[in-house]
Image (tube, helix red, strand yellow):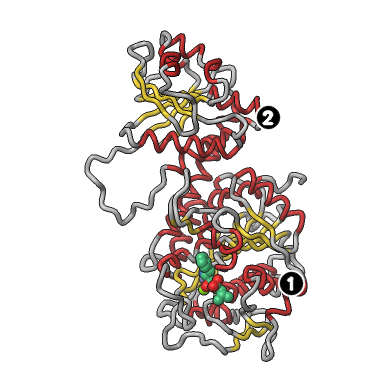
């Protein structure tokens, strides 16, 4: 599907359908010009109480030859008071989902009312425009790879966004381009997450990332088991020990030779399937754990978009990849392992595997002497208990950049919520027989996991984002599917694009 900008007069547009959006607030005062064009038809629809501008409400009518497009859809935006930046995203998604049911290929959405809302509510019109495009593109997504096509399915081909010549600004065209790039990466992240474990394993996923890197000119290195052994990455090696498939460690390096740019390392948890290992998970919902590599998927696709957008940063992506299985040579509870920085870990529960592979990756990140390390991981069920599916847990040592990520989270509606890393929590992961223990008992599970990770970043500024709840959705929203949401790509790109701006 293509999204395009138009500045023609509404009467001149040739499409399958024109969408006019209206707030409920002061509806009758807003309709005049379009009502005149349609010789009083809109007024009639309102008077007969067929349309009041209620949120998600729609009414399909015809222009009877008064426009070059025959079908007209009135679409309700609800009350002005309740309208926020995310309402642009939600409502444009709702429009697309409504139209899809009508089996239409080309649509045109008039943005007049949307721009009016920006002025009334003091919302940046470029942020609103970005959100509208995101809603349109992201709501279309469905993981279809293994579905046989249904006969008679009609796909939406073109969406025109209609602006008046007076409102047009070159920045709208630039935003259309960059938002397309970003949404393409979100969709790729969703596809990777949703792919089953029989397709995506450490070997195949590393090859996929390599292919992706080639297409965007980013240098990528894949460390195989021998290399991982040479680097003494005991976390990654022990987690993968119970699987027939060996581990991989993928390194993406964007702008690696440009030492003038600030260096940021992104680390993504890449467990391609998490059975729990010997501490086997219950079978209910275990299938969801094919998405336990969502952190790695977000890192790879964020760098893809960053490279296409030519961001002036040096960005390193690190993806430790393993399958957590209970094979005969699997890691066992009670085992003591050694991470690449020399620290030893008593393994109490083999299902707390994410932190073990991240430990090696975070330590590797410090070699780049970065300005910031950010890791993303579907790390704990405890984070889902705390925040549900509406916010990711954020923790770390870089207060200023945590605040910046909160701002990006509000703007993209990929929200983060900070949890504390008080010293006392460190007590919970002390071991009698090793430097650390990989689980901290019943309480504050999302925090003790982060406290564990803190041991491997040395003095470098570091932020951990627990995306367990936000990456794996139990049900769809207006613009996110059930399953892999691609959460984090838009958040990180907003943050990276604003890197040089003050808080
Ligand atoms: N991948 C899981 C965490 C998870 C749970 C992600 C639910 C998404 C949805 C992780 O590896 C795990 O199993 N964590 C354990 C840690 C525990 C053993 C300390 C958990 O959360 O139960
Ligand atoms: Mg686990
Ligand atoms: Zn896991």
* Quadrant hosting residue 483: bottom left
**Above-or-below relation of 98 to 306:** above
Q: Residue at x 76, y 74 (%)?
A: 424
- The residue carrying pointer 2 sits among few (fewer than 14), some (14 to 19) or many (20 or more) residues within 10 Å by Cα, namely few
> Which disc number belongs to residue 458?
1
Q: Residue at x 49, y 65 (%)?
A: 293
Q: Is mark 1 within 8 Å of ligand 1?
A: no
> Which disc number belongs to residue 334?
none
Nearer to us in this view, 325 or 8: 325
Secondary structure of the residue carrying tag 1 is loop
Q: Is residue 32 left or right of residue 451?
A: left
Q: Which is more N-terminal, label 2 or label 1?
A: 2
**Residue 471: x, y in percent?**
52, 57
Secondary structure of the residue carrying tag 2 is loop
Whether residues under marks 1 and 2 lie with C-beta atoms below 8 angstroms apart, the answer is no
Per the image, the residue denoted by label 2 is 122
* Quadrant hosting residue 358: bottom right
**Residue 134: x, y in percent?**
51, 40
Considering every residue shown, the one lying at the far bottom of the view is 433
Nearer to us in this view, 492 or 79: 79
- The residue carrying pointer 1 sits among few (fewer than 14), some (14 to 19) or many (20 or more) residues within 10 Å by Cα, namely few
Nearer to us in this view, 419 or 15: 419
**Residue 356: x, y in percent?**
59, 76
């Amino acid at each position: 599907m293509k999204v395009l900008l138009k500045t023609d007069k509404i009467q001149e547009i040739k499409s399958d359908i024109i969408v006019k959006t209206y707030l409920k607030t002061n509806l009758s005062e807003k309709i005049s010009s379009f009502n005149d064009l349609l010789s009083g038809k809109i007024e009639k629809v309102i008077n007969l109480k067929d349309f009041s501008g209620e949120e998600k409400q729609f009414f399909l009518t015809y222009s009877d030859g008064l426009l070059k497009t025959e079908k007209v859809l009135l679409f309700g935006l609800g009350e002005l008071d309740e309208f926020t930046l995310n309402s642009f995203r939600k409502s444009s998604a709702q429009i697309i989902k409504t139209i899809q049911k009508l089996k239409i290929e080309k649509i045109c959405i008039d943005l007049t009312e949307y721009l009016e809302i920006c002025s009334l509510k003091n919302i940046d019109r470029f942020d609103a425009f970005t959100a509208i495009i995101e809603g349109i593109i992201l709501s279309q997504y469905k993981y279809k790879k293994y579905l046989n096509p249904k006969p008679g399915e009609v796909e939406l081909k073109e969406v025109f966004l209609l602006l008046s010549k007076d409102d047009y600004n070159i920045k709208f065209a630039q935003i259309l381009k960059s938002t397309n790039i970003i949404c393409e990466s979100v969709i790729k992240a969703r596809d990777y997450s949703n792919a089953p474990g029989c397709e995506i394993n450490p070997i195949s996923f590393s090859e996929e990332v390599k292919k992706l890197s080639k297409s965007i000119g980013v240098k990528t290195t894949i460390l195989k088991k021998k290399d991982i052994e040479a680097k003494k990455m005991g976390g990654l090696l022990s987690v993968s020990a119970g699987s027939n498939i060996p581990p991989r460690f993928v390194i993406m390096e964007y702008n690696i030779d440009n030492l003038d740019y600030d260096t940021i390392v992104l680390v993504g948890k890449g467990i391609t399937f998490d059975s729990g290992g010997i501490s086997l998970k219950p079978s209910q919902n275990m299938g969801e754990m094919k998405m336990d590599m969502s952190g790695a998927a977000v890192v790879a696709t964020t760098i893809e978009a960053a490279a296409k957008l030519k961001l002036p940063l040096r960005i390193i992506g690190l993806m430790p990849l393993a399958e957590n299985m209970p094979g005969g040579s699997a890691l066992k509870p009670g085992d003591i392992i050694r991470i690449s920085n020399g620290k030893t870990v008593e393994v109490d529960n083999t299902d707390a595997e994410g932190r073990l592979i991240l430990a090696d990756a975070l330590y590797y990140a410090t070699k780049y002497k970065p300005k910031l390390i950010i890791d993303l991981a579907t790390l704990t069920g405890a984070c889902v208990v705390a925040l549900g599916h509406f916010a990711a847990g954020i923790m770390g040592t870089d207060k200023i950049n945590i605040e910046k990520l909160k701002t990006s989270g509000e703007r993209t509606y990929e929200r983060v919520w900070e949890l504390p890393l008080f010293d006392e929590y460190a007590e919970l992961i002390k071991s009698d027989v090793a430097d650390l223990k990989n689980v901290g008992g019943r309480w504050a599970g999302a925090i003790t996991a982060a406290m564990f990770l803190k041991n491997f970043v040395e003095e470098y500024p570091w932020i951990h984002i627990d995306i367990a709840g936000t990456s794996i959705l139990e049900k769809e929203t207006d613009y996110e599917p059930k399953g892999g949401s691609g959460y984090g790509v838009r958040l990180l790109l907003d943050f990276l694009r604003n890197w040089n701006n003050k808080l």
